[in-house]
Amino acid sequence: MYIYKYLIAVFVTILLSVAVVSAEDDKKAEQSGEESHIRTVKEAQAEGNYVYIKIEDDGKDLWIASMPSLLKVKVEKGDQIEYMGGVAMKDFESKAMDMTFDSILFVSRIRVLKNDKGLVPDDDVHKVALDKERGSALFIEPKTDEIEKTADGKSIAEIFNEKSALKDTTVVLRGKVMKVSKNIMKKNWVTVKDGTGTAPEDKLIVLTTDNVYVNDILLFKGTIKTDVNLGSGYKYSILLDEANIISQ
């Protein structure tokens, strides 16, 4: 049993060690649909070869771990971190932490946002502007009745429910920008939520050449594309393509 757990630890260490965090890696992650998560640190502790971080995710405590070299700076309680992907391990025993985690996510793409501001003044006005520019603003979930669809529009729940009937038709959607992945195949890939639907069908990817920012509430008009296969394993059940912003 000890050898088995040792091999698991070695495997995870190798996995994180060979990860190269670059712009090209991030582009591949975005194209594969791998989501970026921004969360607030509830607890952080560096022990052994890892930094163990407790965050809240969907109302539940979640432990993630990474190598200190990937974080580059010390992470502390109250920091905001951004991470992508990861390998989930069940019943992982950490001798350094002297505890066994029911589940822990080992991530190789992670950064501390509060230490990524350069020489920009540390005030709310400049922080909001910088977060918008980088697309790293903390997304605020829309409430169920916060975003009202137009009379001729569709909600995200309706788009998924009527997927077959809406294929190749023009649809109007009002939603809140959750994430922006810029200039992928000459378009901005915008993840939008409107407070409707059930995960994972509670958000929709909108493809547009317009500039948008996290937390913008916008009215998009575009064409529904279904079962999109871009090759190399990049497949999407449904997209709103060729979209333009027609109103805020």
Image (cartoon, helix red, strand yellow):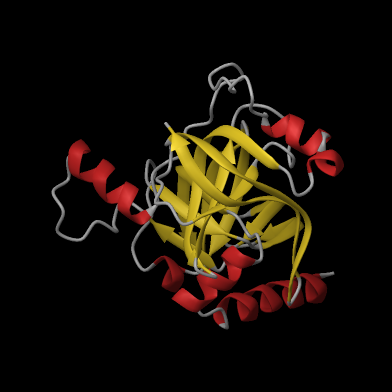
Name the spot of residue 165 as percent of width and height, x first: 85, 39
Residue 155 lies left or right of residue 25; in this view the side is right
Quarter residue 72 falls in: bottom left
Residue in view at x 51 percent, y 62 percent: 187
Near-viewer residue (154 or 30): 154
From this viewpoint, is residue 223 visible?
yes
Name the spot of residue 226 as percent of width and height, x first: 78, 53
Near-viewer residue (111 or 155): 155
Looking at the rendering, in which quadrant would you find the N terminus?
A: bottom right
Name the spot of residue 22 as percent of width and height, x first: 46, 77
Residue in view at x 35 percent, y 56 percent: 134
Near-viewer residue (141 or 184): 184
Residue in view at x 56 percent, y 19 percent: 148
Residue in view at x 73 percent, y 31 percent: 157
Looking at the rendering, in which quadrant would you find the C terminus?
A: top left
From this viewpoint, is residue 101 visible?
no
Quarter residue 203 falls in: top right
Residue 162 lies left or right of residue 24; in this view the side is right
